[in-house]
């Protein structure tokens, strides 16, 4: 009983996020890199949200979902990066039990929301390319709101199941998390009991929250590809391709890392690979999303010119 009590007490004391403390020369470089990417993420995604609200030409389903994605990326990075910067900057690598629980919940929830939201965006692109004449009828505002709600609810629902299960695992006094944030694979790897049942549950939910949306994305794009190749003019093909290419790049970046992280057993999980992959989808992907959509999108560029133009006239 004393050992169990000691384990519970040590768990509630909090955790030590080892992060990159075994590579102190890397920490200062990473601090600068992570801070730069974080500021770019906030600036880029805030720009997308403001442009979507201010420019009436962007009051369409595509930009409604893009604004949701931008808001999601801002929440995701704000839930992980400030703690990471604090740990990289100073000698203290601790995080409270409550802080770790909140971080785990939001990392899992927002990651799940992004998976489903990307599938919703693929369906929107399918409707735009394959059913252009009925697009406004199919993607009416009520349906857009419902699809966005499904994305947010499914992500937070998944996390509501997995986060408490992960945190309740006995750790026999272990407090050192070999990661720079409280992420599920790293926390499961710390357990001193057999985690096969929990890993099976995690895998089953990952099929629902990661693979099912991916399959829907692939189905949408198979229809889109067929429609694009049936277009006779090269200009029409290019226009249809440009409509979807930004979304395809974002899907590839996001899903590539997520599948590798969450669809493999914890005992085959390489911590160093895990850290760098997490670093990639925590700081790189959210900051490049606005760039990918802005650089390849004429409407966003025009909206930005219009807003900046207004600003310079008023000054």
Image: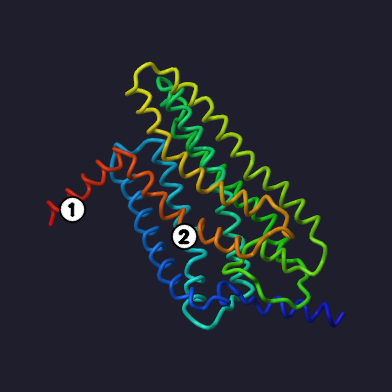
Identify which residue is drawn at 57% across, 69% down.
180
Compute the Cα span from label 1 to label 2.
30 Å
Q: Position of residue 272 (x, y in %)?
A: 61, 65
Say what secondary structure mark 2 lies in.
Answer: helix
Residue 275, percent across and down?
A: 58, 64
Q: In this rendering, would 183 be left or right of 229?
A: right
The residue labelled by disc 2 is 283
Disc 1 designates what residue? 311
In the picture, which quadrant includes the N terminus? bottom right
> Is residue 2 depicted above or below 52 in this figure?
below
State whether residue 18 is above or below residue 267: below
**Picture quadrant of residue 3:** bottom right
Q: How many badges with numbers are in the image?
A: 2
Residue 9 is situated, as x and y percent measured from the top left of the image, at 74, 80
Instruction: Pick whichever of labels 1 and 2 is earlier in the sequence.
Output: 2
Q: Are marks 1 and 2 in contact (CB under 8 Å)?
A: no
87 horizontally vs 4: left or right = left
Question: What residue lies at 68% left-to-right and 43% top-to-bottom?
Answer: 207
Quarter of the image for residue 237 reads top left
Q: Residues within 10 Å of mark 2 (few under 14, many from 20)?
A: many
**Quadrant of the rendered structure where residue 222 is?**
top right
Numbered disc 1: secondary structure: helix
Q: Characterize the local packing of mark 1: few (<14), some (14-19) or many (20 or more) Cα atoms within 10 angstroms.
A: few
Residue at the right extreme?
1
Mark in front: 1 vs 2: 2
On screen, residue 184 versus residue 142, left or right, reads: right
Quadrant where the C terminus lies?
bottom left
């Amino acid at each position: 009983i004393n050992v169990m009590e000691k384990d519970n007490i040590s768990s509630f004391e909090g955790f030590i996020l080892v992060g990159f403390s075994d590579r102190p020369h890397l920490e200062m470089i990473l601090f600068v890199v992570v801070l730069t990417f974080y500021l770019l993420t906030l600036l880029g995604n805030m720009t997308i949200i403001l442009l979507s609200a201010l420019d009436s030409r962007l009051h369409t389903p595509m930009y409604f979902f893009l604004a949701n994605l931008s808001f999601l990326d801002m929440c995701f990075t704000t839930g992980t990066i400030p703690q990471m910067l604090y740990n990289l900057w100073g000698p203290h690598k601790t995080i409270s039990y409550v802080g770790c629980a909140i971080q785990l919940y939001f990392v899992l929830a927002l990651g799940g929301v992004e998976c489903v939201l990307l599938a919703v965006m693929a369906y929107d692109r399918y409707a735009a390319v394959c059913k252009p004449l009925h697009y406004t009828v199919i993607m009416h505002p009520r349906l857009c709101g419902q699809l966005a709600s499904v994305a947010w609810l499914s992500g937070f629902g998944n996390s509501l199941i997995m986060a408490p299960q992960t945190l309740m695992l006995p750790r026999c006094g272990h407090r050192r998390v070999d990661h720079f944030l409280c992420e599920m694979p790293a926390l499961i790897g710390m357990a001193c009991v057999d985690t096969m049942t929990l890993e099976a549950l995690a895998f089953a939910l990952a099929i629902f929250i990661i693979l099912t949306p991916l399959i829907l994305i692939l189905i949408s794009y198979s229809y889109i590809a067929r429609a694009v190749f049936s277009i006779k003019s090269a200009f029409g093909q290019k226009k249809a391709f440009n409509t979807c290419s930004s979304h395809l790049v974002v899907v590839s970046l996001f899903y590539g890392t997520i599948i590798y992280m969450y669809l493999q057993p914890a005992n085959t999980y390489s911590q160093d690979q895990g850290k760098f992959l997490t670093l990639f989808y925590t700081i790189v992907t959210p900051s490049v999303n606005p760039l990918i959509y802005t650089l390849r999108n004429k409407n966003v560029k025009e909206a930005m010119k219009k807003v900046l133009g207004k600003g310079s006239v008023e000054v």
